[in-house]
């Protein structure tokens, strides 16, 4: 059994899933297993996932109805925990955070004997971070509100690249998350409450590219701010 499980939530990802890239990576990294959660897709996502599964050490978790990214990732955690992996993380299906970055985060977690590693989209002189100015400004505003409320000390809670020691999160994913857009924050808050003294680090990504056809647009913002209000009142 591979020691590391990576959860990849998928909802209508047929046009963005890079099957060959996933297969090549998994064939080169036998200690990593991917859990693709097909979250009620109605396109050819399942067909592509089956191609990946046939050629690599990956599993498909099929949800009949679309539950949203938060619940899809939680279901993935539960399956990975049942398989007793020592490290469990998640990554976006569009590979906005590349697979090479995933290996770097895993290496940092292992070599520094950390409990958690969080990828972060901090733009520096030696990094390539591409996302719209509008999304960046809105994101920074929300991140400031979250930090003022909870004091997590995390620059980028929403980056879809995180790795955890399995013991750290086994009790944090028992119950569904309250929000759709801020489940990352909820997970960190639960981990902090259940595991005082855990050791974590936030690692600036070398490269993060906002893939076209992102599901977050202007029409999403009313829901985002509704979720923010819910987050602030539930924790």
Image: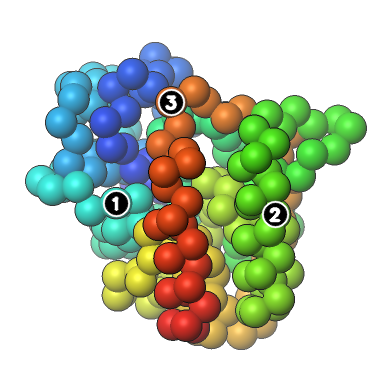
Q: Earlier in the sequence, mark 2 or mark 1?
A: 1
**Which residue position holds label 1?**
68
Query: Closer to the N terminus: mark 1 or mark 3?
Result: 1
Q: Position of residue 6 (x, y in %)?
A: 42, 45
Residue on which the image places disc 2:
140
Can residue 25 be seen here? The reply is no
Residues at marks 1 and 3, CA–CA distance in whole angstroms: 17 Å
Whole-percent x and y of residue 142? 63, 61
- Which is more foreground, mark 1 or mark 3? 3
Q: Quadrant of residue 53?
A: top left
Crowding at dot 1, Cα within 10 Å, few <14 / some 14-19 / many 20+, comes out as some
The answer to whether 39 is drawn above or below residue 99 in the figure is below
- Work out whether 92 lies above or below 192: above
> Residue 14, position in %: x, y?
28, 22
Front residue of this view, candidates 135 and 106: 135
Q: Residue at x 73, y 69 (%)?
A: 153
* Residue appearing at x 68%, y 29% in the figure: 130
- Residue found 44% across the figure and 82% down from its top: 234
Look at the image and tell me whether residue 232 can be seen.
yes
Q: Which element type, helix, strand or loop, lies under badge 1?
A: loop
Marked residue nearer the N-terminal end (2 or 3): 2
Residue 172 in the image: above or below residue 205? below
Which mark is on residue 213?
3
Q: Secondary structure at mark 3?
A: loop
Alpha carbon distance from label 2 to label 3: 22 Å
Horizontal and vertical percent position of residue 33: 38, 40
Looking at the image, residue 54 sits to the left or right of residue 142; the answer is: left
Q: Is 102 in front, or is 29? A: 102
Count the labels in the image: 3
In the picture, measured across the screen, residue 19 lies left or right of residue 12, that is: right
The image quarter containing residue 198 is bottom right
């Amino acid at each position: 059994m591979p020691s590391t499980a990576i959860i990849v939530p998928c909802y209508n990802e047929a046009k963005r899933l890079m099957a060959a890239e996933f297969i090549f990576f998994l064939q080169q990294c036998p200690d990593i297993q991917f859990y693709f959660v097909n979250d009620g897709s109605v396109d050819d996502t399942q067909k592509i996932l089956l191609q990946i599964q046939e050629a690599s050490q990956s599993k498909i978790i099929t949800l009949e109805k679309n539950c949203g990214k938060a619940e899809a990732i939680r279901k993935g955690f539960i399956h990975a925990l049942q398989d007793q992996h020592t490290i469990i993380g998640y990554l976006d299906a569009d590979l906005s955070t590349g697979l090479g970055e995933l290996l770097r985060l895993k290496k940092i977690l292992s070599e520094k004997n950390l409990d958690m590693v969080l990828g972060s989209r901090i733009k520096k002189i030696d990094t390539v971070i591409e996302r719209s100015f509008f999304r960046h400004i809105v994101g920074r505003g929300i991140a400031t509100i979250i930090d003022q409320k909870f004091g997590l000390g995390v620059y980028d809670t929403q980056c879809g690249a995180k790795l955890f020691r399995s013991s750290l999160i086994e009790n944090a994913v028992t119950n569904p998350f309250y929000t759709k857009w801020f489940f990352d924050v909820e997970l960190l808050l639960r981990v902090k409450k259940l595991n005082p003294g855990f050791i974590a680090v936030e690692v600036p990504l070398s490269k993060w590219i906002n893939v076209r056809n992102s599901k977050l647009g202007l029409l999403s913002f009313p829901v985002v701010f509704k979720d923010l209000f819910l987050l602030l009142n539930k924790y």
